Image: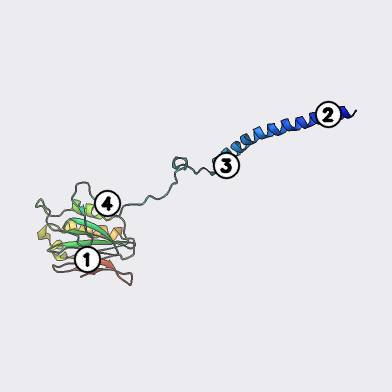
């Protein structure tokens, strides 16, 4: 009787060893499977996995004409003839001689174009040119023209119609009520800024 009990116990012990071995063999597989699951959970999404979100796309500050009639200024504190620039709070033009500055405010940014009566090809500034200037400035809340306005309004200089397009376009484009103003200045150097009182005015 004792022998059978011992044999049975021995067999049971052997079985336990086999089960332990089996568990020991399966344990690495369990760990590997668990690590794979954790890796799948923790793996960051790839850019292509993230769906596109519809929303406003940022617009450029300046929209230059394709024909090259306006160039972006390399220095917004020295915007030359037929150049357009955009500065944070302030811009300046090079010297005016029968020229005007067309300037607008867009938030904290100031944008401006330096215009001459006569183009490089010898022809006067025209209505098509005026439309390109308006397009180049993008959106804005306030607008100003300053400089030799009397020259530009004089029909003898052949730019009065173009100047009217500029005026009407700026008035229509300004989102602020009564957001357009103009100033007659003699030849000189001028600019535009948003001052400490948050007003938009010419500088000298």
User: In the rendered structure, which disc, 2 or 1, sits on the residue that comes first in sequence?
Assistant: 2
- Quick check: 187 above or below 86? below
Q: Secondary structure at mark 3?
A: helix
Q: Position of residue 118 (x, y in %)?
A: 11, 56
> What residue would you read off at disc 4?
63
Are discs 2 and 1 less than 8 Å apart at CB? no
* Depth order, front residue of 87/132: 87
Are discs 3 and 2 less than 8 Å apart at CB? no
Quadrant housing residue 130: bottom left
In front: mark 1 or mark 3?
3
Figure quadrant of the N terminus? top right
Q: At x 25% / y 55%, what residue is drawn?
A: 134
Figure quadrant of the C terminus? bottom left
> What residue would you read off at disc 2?
8
Are discs 1 and 3 less than 8 Å apart at CB? no
In this rendering, position of residue 48 left or right of residue 139: right
User: In the rendered structure, which disc, 3 or 4, sits on the residue that comes first in sequence?
Assistant: 3
Instruction: State the CA–CA distance, disc 1 to disc 4.
Output: 20 Å
Query: Which labelled disc corresponds to residue 90?
Result: none
* Depth order, front residue of 121/194: 194
> What residue would you read off at disc 1?
191
In front: mark 2 or mark 4?
2
In front: mark 3 or mark 2?
2
Q: Secondary structure at mark 1?
A: strand
């Amino acid at each position: 009787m004792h022998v059978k009990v011992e044999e049975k116990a021995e067999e049971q012990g052997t079985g336990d060893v086999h089960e332990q071995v089996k568990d020991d063999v399966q344990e690495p597989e369990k760990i590997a499977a668990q690590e794979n699951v954790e890796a799948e959970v923790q793996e960051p999404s790839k850019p292509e996995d993230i769906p596109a979100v519809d929303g406003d796309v940022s617009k450029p500050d300046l929209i230059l004409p394709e024909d090259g009639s306006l160039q972006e200024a390399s220095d917004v504190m020295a915007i030359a003839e037929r150049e357009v620039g955009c500065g944070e709070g302030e811009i300046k033009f090079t010297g005016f001689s029968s020229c005007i500055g067309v300037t607008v405010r867009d938030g904290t940014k100031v944008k401006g174009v330096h215009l001459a009566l006569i183009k490089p090809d010898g022809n006067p500034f025209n209505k098509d040119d005026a439309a390109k200037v308006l397009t180049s400035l993008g959106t804005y809340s306030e607008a100003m023209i300053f400089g030799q306005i009397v020259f530009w309004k004089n029909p003898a200089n052949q730019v009065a119609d173009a100047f009217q397009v500029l005026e009407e376009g700026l008035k229509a484009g300004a989102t602020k009520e009564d957001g357009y103003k103009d100033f007659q200045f003699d030849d000189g150097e001028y600019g535009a800024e948003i001052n400490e009182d948050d007003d938009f005015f010419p500088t000298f």
